[in-house]
Amino acid sequence: MKKLLLGSLIGAFVLTGCSRNAITGRNQLNIVSESQLQEMAVTQYRQFLAENNVVTANSSMSKEYAMVQRVGKRIANAITQYYTQQGLGKELQGYKWEFNLVQGKDVNAFCMPGGKVVIYTGLLPVAQNEAGVAVVMGHEIAHAILQHGSERMSRAVAAQYGGQIAGAVIGSQNQALGNIFGAVYAPVATTTMILPNSRAQESEADRYGLRFAALAGYNPQEAIPFWTRMAQAGGSSNVPTILRSHPTNEQRIRDLQKIVPEAMKYYRPMSN
């Protein structure tokens, strides 16, 4: 009886923590607030940049630096315009975009809440071109602004703490919450601790990420060859870091073949 009561209480708490995403229309469990995540992200992002070799405009990779900045700003502007046109500008509250290229062999990229983006130099040979960078950056940004990180964290908190969710576990300074944040986001996640995205989240990030890239002037058709190259890069034992939380397989390529025509409706090539 006690277990049944506890389960009912947890279930009720989870239900009250659900909200409908304004863009996708899907119900999400979000018991960790976006403002909390953005606050934690700033701290972790600053620490990550301090501990890694960040490419600057004056480095030997100045062209690559400029490209990442250019792609990031174009996509951020496109997203801001898109959300504003939908009457959803408030959904981006607290976003202060930053784009950094970091020296590293990892084939990886990530976007933390609040628009804190990192591209690893190891990703560039797989991306091959600016449109490829736009595809992966749009995808990662979509995960953030569609609040997939909050959803993953909320599910982890609910599963781990159950009835203890309400209270200290959700405190912004709580170490347990910080540990779960570290398991979700790339800068502090170990190879064995990364919490994977769900199939639904991946589908949403593909769809809206391509839409954002298209609105920014990048050809969505680059998505299929890019993710095909990613799948090929994961064929050895040295699996790209991004694939540990972003599974790539034949089904994904088939799904992209359906998504690309939709994204092409938003594509307006950049004028030279």
Image: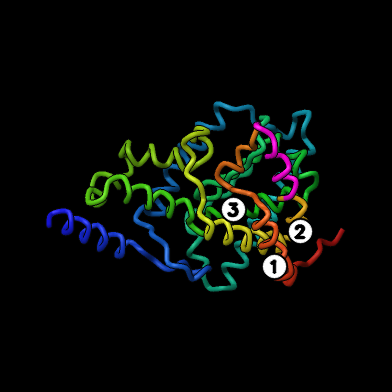
Pinpoint residue 239: horizontal percent, then vertical percent. 64, 36
Amino acid tagged 1: Lys
Front residue of 236/187: it is: 236
User: In the image as oriented, which residue stretches furthest toward the right?
Assistant: 272
Q: Amino acid at mark 2?
A: Tyr
Mark-to-mark CA distance, 1 and 2: 18 Å
Location of residue 31 by image quarter: bottom left
Q: CA distance from mark 3 to mark 1?
A: 21 Å
Colour style of the rendered protein structure: rainbow
Q: Is residue 183 left or right of residue 229?
A: left
Answer with the quarter of the image where residue 259 lies. bottom right
Of the residues under marks 3 and 2, which one precedes in the sequence? 3
Q: Is residue 229 above or below residue 15?
A: above
Q: Residues within 10 Å of mark 2 (few under 14, many from 20)?
A: many
Reading the image, the residue beneath label 3 is 141
Q: Secondary structure at mark 1?
A: helix
Q: Earlier in the sequence, mark 3 or mark 1?
A: 3
Q: Is residue 255 magenta?
A: no
